[in-house]
Amino acid sequence: MFGGGTMSSSDGQRFPVRGKTLTGRNMVIHGGQVLSTYTHVSDQWSTYGTKIIVPTAREAHFVLDDFLGNATDLPIAEHATDSHGATLIDFALFDLVGKALTPRLRDLTRVTLVREETPTEIAKRYPHAGPLLGARWNEDLVAGCWPDLLRMAGSLKYGQATASLIVGKWSAASRQNTLAAALKEWGMLRRTVHLAKYLSDPAFRRKISRQLNKGESLHALRRDLHYAQ
């Protein structure tokens, strides 16, 4: 009924605040000063992580923080987010630490999927999906940086560096940075694998939506409590 504790999700929620605050920001769309809470929820409806973040910061930078810092006994192996919580860097780092990022992405027609062969060979093998695989995967780039990628994953897994700092730095890195390019290349491959399953497996899509709905229902509870109900 409540799930096996192997899957979780995360999402942000904004609340109005008054007075001086380090994390609050004025946002016209919300009619004043707000701050964001970023919460991680298991498939058993338990909240195992909450972080106050600047509302103008990208949520994807904070997905791994409480996920890797989970101090509970939950054997979480899979994590769902919406489009705001998934970047190529997140796809790569989740896989490198031995976990799975399974987001619900929007605007799938704009997402670049990768292939390993020429367009002609791919079109023959996959007549329907072939046109979606628009980019050639650079395997040599990833192979050349593989030891450094594993060391980075080890630093995250054993707490030598915070995930939000790593994700933020690599997301902002220039294209000339070889390691950042390799990390994004690996993320493109993992995103392609995820979307192939997401598009072809209705049960997989329902599982992700069901988990994200659990987080949304907890958001609704907090919203009711916050606004005098």
Image: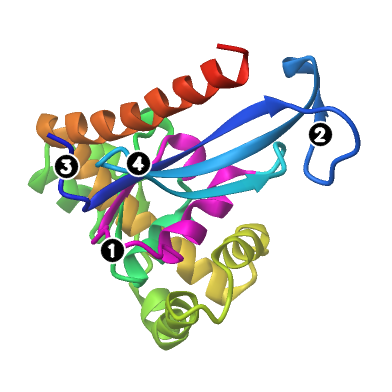
Q: Is disc 2 placed on a helix, strand or loop?
A: strand
In magenta, the rendered stretch is 58-85
User: Mark 2 or mark 1: which comes first in sequence?
Assistant: 2
Residue sitting at x 90%, y 38%: 20
Q: Name the residue that disc number 4 marks.
A: 103
Residue at the image position 31 percent from the left and 37 percent from the top: 45
Front: mark 4 or 3: 3
| Image-based side of 35 in relation to 67, left or right | right
- Residue at image position (38%, 65%) is 186
Contact between marks 1 and 3 (CB within 8 A): the answer is no
Tell me the number on the disc at residue 73: 1
- Comes first in the chain, label 4 or label 1: 1
Q: Is residue 227 a member of the stretch shown in magenta? A: no
Q: Residue furthest front?
A: 229
Compared to residue 132, the image places residue 77 above or below, namely below
- The x, y position of residue 102, in whole percent, is 30, 46
Q: Position of residue 72 (x, y in %)?
A: 35, 61
Q: Answer with left or right where residue 40 lies relative to residue 136.
A: right
Disc 4 residue type (three-letter): Pro
Q: Are marks 4 and 2 in contact (CB under 8 Å)?
A: no
Q: Secondary structure at mark 3?
A: loop
79 in the magenta segment: yes
